[in-house]
Image (cartoon, helix red, strand yellow):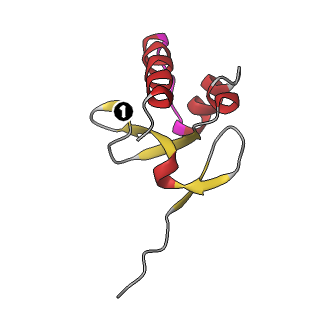
Amino acid sequence: MIQQIPVLRVCISCRKTYDRKDLLKITKDHKQGIMLQKGMGRSAYICKSKKCYSDSKIKKKLQKALKTFLEPEFIEIFEKEITSYNNNPH
């Protein structure tokens, strides 16, 4: 039986390495725009710790990682999603 090697990614806020399943994925798809937890394209990952997702510089870090400008509407949706994501862990 082949053993699965975990896929590791780095949190853009704390710069620590985690298994991809334990992170929130934000993706910039060239056709569909910015998406959470799905899509293919340039992606950034944020860990579930409150310190990371409530970082005052998270918007700037996301914009740099995704190489795009983030609309204020997306930031509101992102904040709602991250709070519900932490209230209902998978």
The single residue placed furthest to the bottom in the displayed view is: 1
Does residue 70 appear to the left or right of 15 in the view shown? Answer: left
Does residue 75 appear to the left or right of 40 in the view shown? Answer: right
Looking at the rendered structure, the number of numbered marks drawn on it comes to: 1
Instruction: Residue 70: say if magenta.
Output: yes
Does residue 86 appear to the left or right of 56 in the view shown? Answer: left
Camera-nearest residue between 15 and 51: 51
Residue marked by disc 1? 35
Q: Quadrant of residue 58?
A: top right
Query: How many C-alpha atoms fall within 10 Å of the one at disc 1: few (<14), some, or many (≥20)?
Result: some
Image coords of residue 80 (percent x, y): 45, 17
Residue 45 drawn above or below residue 62? below
The chief SS type of the magenta part is loop
Q: Quadrant of residue 89?
A: top left
Residue drawn where x is 64% and y is 35% of the image: 49
Camera-nearest residue between 68 and 59: 59
Image coords of residue 14 (percent x, y): 72, 41
Image coords of residue 42 (percent x, y): 45, 45
Does residue 41 appear to the left or right of 23 in the view shown? Answer: left
| Image quarter (top left, top right, bottom left or bottom right) of the N terminus | bottom left
| Image quarter (top left, top right, bottom left or bottom right) of the C terminus | top left
The residues colored magenta run: 66-72
Residue drawn where x is 47% and y is 26% of the image: 87
Image coords of residue 85 (percent x, y): 45, 30
Q: Amino acid at mark 1?
A: Met
Kindly state the secondary structure of the residue where label 1 is placed.
strand
Residue drawn where x is 38% and y is 85% of the image: 2
